[in-house]
Image (tube, helix red, strand yellow):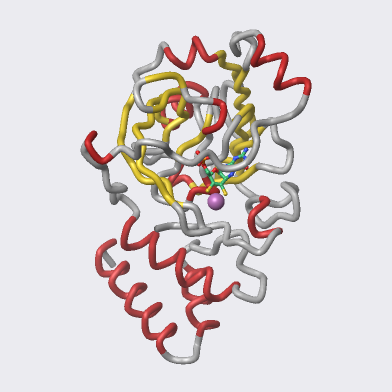
Amino acid sequence: MTNLSRRKLFTAGLAAAGGASGLAVAAALADRYGLIPPDHGGLYGPGETLTYGTHRLLTRHSLAREFPRSQITKTPFANGKPPQSEDFKLLQAGGFADWRLTVDGMVARPATFSLAGLRRYPSRSQITHLACEEGWSFIAEWIGVPLIHVLDMVGILPRAKYVVYFSIQRDWWDSVDMADALHPQTLLTYGMNGGDLPVGHGGPLRLRVPRQLGYKSVKYITRLTVTDTMKGFGKGLGSAAPEEGYSWYAGI
Ligand SMILES: Nc1nc2c(c(=O)[nH]1)N[C@H]1C(S)=C(S)[C@@H](COP(=O)(O)O)O[C@H]1N2
Ligand SMILES: [Mo]
C-alpha cells in the first residue's frame, strides 16, 4: 500500500472509531502505526492517542504560523519566577559564560556546548505565538539554532524516538517525538525580539516548540537526552506535565 492510502485509511479509521464509541479501536489502530504517546495509559489515555495519532498523520510537516514584526506583543508576560538556586545565580553573575548544554543518550558523539558555541551555528529567527494552557498568550520573535542542527552534530541513532530536555529547574523536563525534534521551527532559543533571551523568558537557553502549548517550551535548558523509550524518565509518561494531569502531547 502507498503511504498516502495507508494514511487515509488510518485517519478514516481513527475518525470512525472516535465518532462511534470505540476509542479502544482507535488505540489499537494507533498502536499498529506506532503512534501511541507515552502518557496513553491514564483516564484520558484513549483520547490522548486519538489526538496525537490524528495530528501526527495530518500535520507532521506543517509549520506553526509566523507573524509580521508589527504583531509582536509589546509587553509579553513572563510566567513564574526565574530559578532561585545558587547555581543559577552564579552562572547569571558570570554572564552565562559557563552555561553548558549537554547532549547524550542514543547519539554517536555525545557533546557539550557553550552558548558561544551554539551561537556560531546557523541561526533561525521566527515570530510565533506562545500560548499558555491557562488562557493567555503573546507573540514574540525567537532566535536560536534549530534543534535538528545540534542533533545532526551529535548524530542521532536510527532507533531514536524521543528527545528529552531538562531544565536547571529540576521539576521542569519534557520530551518531544522526532517529528517535533527535527521540525525546522523547533529552536534552541538564545534570543528574543532582537536581543538576548531575557531570564524571565528562559534565558540563557530555552527550547521553543511552537507547534505545542507554552508548557512544552521549557526554560533554562541544560541537557538533552535522545532515547527510544520514556521508561526510566520520571514516571515514564514523557514529561513532568502528565504527572500533574496535563497531556504529554499539547499540539495546537
Ligand atoms: N523551566 C521552566 N520552563 C517553563 C515554565 C517554568 O515555570 N519553568 N513555565 C511553562 C509555561 S506553563 C509556559 S505557558 C511558558 C511561559 O513562557 P514565558 O515565561 O516566556 O511567558 O513557559 C513554560 N516553560
Ligand atoms: Mo503555561
Q: Which residue is at the far front?
A: 75
Foreground residue, 161 or 123? 123
Q: Position of residue 146 (x, y in %)?
A: 40, 29
Foreground residue, 157 or 230? 230
> Viewed as shown, does residue 7 lie left or right of 52?
left
Q: Position of residue 130 (x, y in %)?
A: 42, 46
Residue 158 lies, with reference to residue 60, above or below; the image says: above
Q: Quadrant of the N terminus?
A: bottom left
Residue 13 lies, with reference to residue 20, above or below; the image says: above
Q: Position of residue 200 (x, y in %)?
A: 56, 31
Q: Position of residue 233 (x, y in %)?
A: 72, 47
What's the residue at 47%, 59% (across, down)? 135
Q: Which residue is at the far bottom?
A: 21
Foreground residue, 84 or 51? 84
State which quadrant residue 83 falls in: top right
> Viewed as shown, does residue 209 lie left or right of 231?
left
What's the residue at 36%, 73% (across, down)? 10
What's the residue at 50%, 27% (across, down)? 155
Q: Quadrant of the C terminus?
A: bottom left
